[in-house]
Amino acid sequence: MSTFASGTITVSNATPGQSVSINIAPQQGFAWSSGNPSDPNNSGITLSTTSGSPVPVNSFSMTNQVMQTITASGGSSTGSSTISFNISTYISNAGTGGYVGMSCTADPGVTVTFAFSNSKSVTLSSAQIGVMWPT
């Protein structure tokens, strides 16, 4: 039986037209998820900005191991040259916990962090890092 944990990805300093991919290593049964299917109150994926303005995204896709966004070429609706936004999502765990292997692929200058709810955020890079499954 799978367990589910919510988390937040924060993308900062992206510019229009950039791609950001957040990867989960295909080990120990971890996968991106849109939530717990047995709990409709804890499901869904949300893209948001701190200002409440629309997130300028050209495309969004998700597989078990990769979540990818491409920012819209039109730019930020706030008039800023950079785009910062959050993705609230879930990870499923078919195993017993442990560490989720995570990494990201992003253009230079883009900062990507991840945090499980009520946990400290970690900065992601092209090198895989272990993020402790919440207890």
Image (cartoon, rainbow, N blue to C red):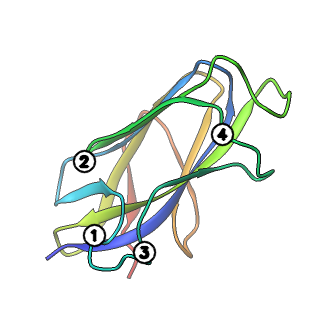
Q: Position of residue 26 (x, y in %)?
A: 19, 47
26 vs 14, left or right, is left
Depth check: 97 or 62 in front? 62
In three-dimensional space, the C-alpha distance between marks 2 and 4, rounded to whole angstroms, equals 23 Å
Q: Residue at x 16, y 60 (%)?
A: 28
The circle drawn on residue 42 is 3
The disc placed on residue 28 is none
Quarter of the picture containing the N terminus is: bottom left
Crowdedness near tag 4: few (<14), some (14–19) or many (≥20) residues, C-alpha within 10 Å: some
Label 1 Cα neighbours within 10 Å, binned few <14 / some 14-19 / many ≥20: some
The answer to whether the residue labelled 2 contacts the one labelled 3, judged by CB atoms less than 8 Å apart, is no
Query: Does residue 17 sit above or below 69 in this rendering?
Result: above
Inspect the image, locate mark 4, and give the three-letter code of the amino acid beneath it: Val
Between the C-alphas of marks 2 and 1, the distance is 18 Å
* Label 3 with label 1: CB-CB less than 8 Å: no
The answer to the question of whether label 2 and label 1 lie on touching residues, with beta carbons closer than 8 A, is no
Amino acid under disc 1: Gly
The residue indicated by pointer 4 is 55
First in residue order: circle 2 vs circle 3: 3
Instruction: Identify the residue under disc 1.
Output: 98
Kind of element beneath mark 4: loop
Residue drawn at x 58%, y 67% as measured from the top left: 120
Q: Position of residue 76 (x, y in %)?
A: 75, 29
Give the label, 2 or 1, closer to the camera: 2
Q: Disc 2 versus disc 3: distance between alpha carbons?
A: 18 Å
Which-is-in-front pick, marks 2 and 3? 3
At label 2, the amino acid type is: Asn
> Quadrant of residue 82 in the image?
top right
Q: Nearer the viewer, mark 3 or mark 1?
A: 3
Q: Which mark is residue 64?
A: 2
